[in-house]
Amino acid sequence: MATCPPHPSYPSAPTDGAPAAGPLRHAHWWQRPWVRYGAPTTLLAISGLVILALVREETGTEGFLVGLGLALLPVPLLIASFRWLDRVEPGPWRNLVFSFAWGACAAALIAIVANSFATRWIATATADPSSADTLGATVIAPVVEETAKAAAVLLVFLFRRRDFTGIVDGVVIAGVTATGFAFTENILYLGTAFGTDQLTGGSGIASVTAATFFVRIIMSPFAHPLFTVLTGIGFGVAALSADRQHIRRVAFPLAGLLLAMGMHAMWNGSSAFGEYGFFAVYAAFMVPIFGLLTWLVIWTRQRELRTVRAELPAYAVAGWLSPAEPYALGSMRARRIARQYARRHAGKAAAREVARYEAYATSLAFLRHRARRGRAGPDFAVREMELLAALWRRREAARPALDHAARITAPPVPVTAPPWPMPGAYGHGYAYGQVSPYGQAPAYGQAPAYGQPAGYAPQPAQYPAYNPYRS
């Protein structure tokens, strides 16, 4: 399979008109829209109806509604967190919708059916229902659930490859999938706990519902996302690998999946470590690993911004971007200011165009970065021209906003005093900023105010900080 050269040339910007986006590629039957969108939608819809019936049968209508209301609480926060991590190169919403729906419907259905079957089979084979439940929770459930959730990451990796370019994309897809899975699982656990309270008369903070809510919603809403994020990191490393590195592209996703299973098994088996086993595992493993992964993802996000700022100046030299755009596109604050400027002066449609411009420019920088490292595919030239054409069509709306953001956010460059003496009045030499006996000269670029009396000497003033983006 041919790949692009390590250092492909930069195309020149057109002098008039819009650039061609490249030749159209033949689409196979499985790439047609009705197959790509119709088949997954049908599968997820059927899975959703089946899982709805199973959970409602297990919890009852009232328990289902209570569980649904309580399980919804952490979902917006988790989705917003993963979306924030993905702000450098935001993927399309359809990928997130698919991932959440897969976790909530397909993965949850697979887990319920497989876990129930495996637990019953173990109980029958060993004639010990209690040990079957423990074995099912610590061995069977982690394997089944993490594999079912990893299937969503694999599908996006294979069929939405353009949107899956690195570690952050793997973390986001895996985290959203696990959020959907935890949502359905929380409905089941909270609804069942509510039914137990209805039978036993439990109420208040001593109720089973309150205890379940505290453990699953307050203390560990990130548990399932944390497990599956390990799988996502493995796929993200595979996405950064070259096509010829077959072992690396297979080994890292499998290693991430095994780590996710192991951590899930340790979490489920924490109750076997004694009365305070849950809290010990939570404090010793869950919180530190959560902090470590959060640091890793944020560091990766900052590295992506540095890549954008390093790769785009060459396109500015070639005429595709203005000189200030690479700086603005490499700063999240400048991007936000650009969108706000466009919304304030041209409306929401212009702000959306600026956001799309930022996303396309980021994808272009990552594509060029992979090409320089010899990791871009054979369609590099076609993809590059598609992105450049998308930028060129939006340049009229985006450039004024990005130039304004660059002027606002560019750091000032301090100007120091020259080491040589400055000539004073009547040939006397005085150091920079020194007051002569005949009165102090005004600072550079500053004159006495209009109407001041003769002999007026202004107060000592420093040179203003120089900013190359300020007009």
Image (spheres, rainbow, N blue to C red):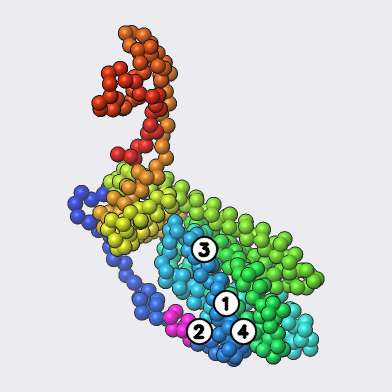
- Look at the picture and state if 378 lies above or below 54: above
14 or 354, which is in the foreground?
Answer: 354
Residue corresponding to mark 2: 48
Nearer the viewer's eye, disc 2 or disc 3? Answer: 3
Q: CA distance from mark 1 to mark 2?
A: 16 Å
* Image-based side of 325 in relation to 52, left or right: left
Residue named by callout 4: 191
**Residue 4 in view, yes or no:** no
Tell me the residue that label 1 is attached to: 71
Label 1 element class: helix
Task: Give SS at disc 2.
Answer: helix
Q: Secondary structure at mark 3?
A: helix
Place of residue 134 in the rendered image (x, y in percent of width and height, measured from the top left): 74, 79
Q: Which residues are magenta?
A: 40-48
Q: Residue 7: horizontal and vertical position, in percent? A: 39, 47
Q: Which residue is mark 3?
A: 81
Please report contact status of discs 1 and 2: CB closer than 8 Å, yes or no. Answer: no
Q: Residue at x 39, y 26 (%)?
A: 461
Q: Are marks 1 and 4 in contact (CB under 8 Å)?
A: no
Residue 114, above or below 249: below
Q: Earlier in the sequence, mark 2 or mark 4?
A: 2
Is 411 above or below relative to 150?
above
Secondary structure beneath label 4 = helix
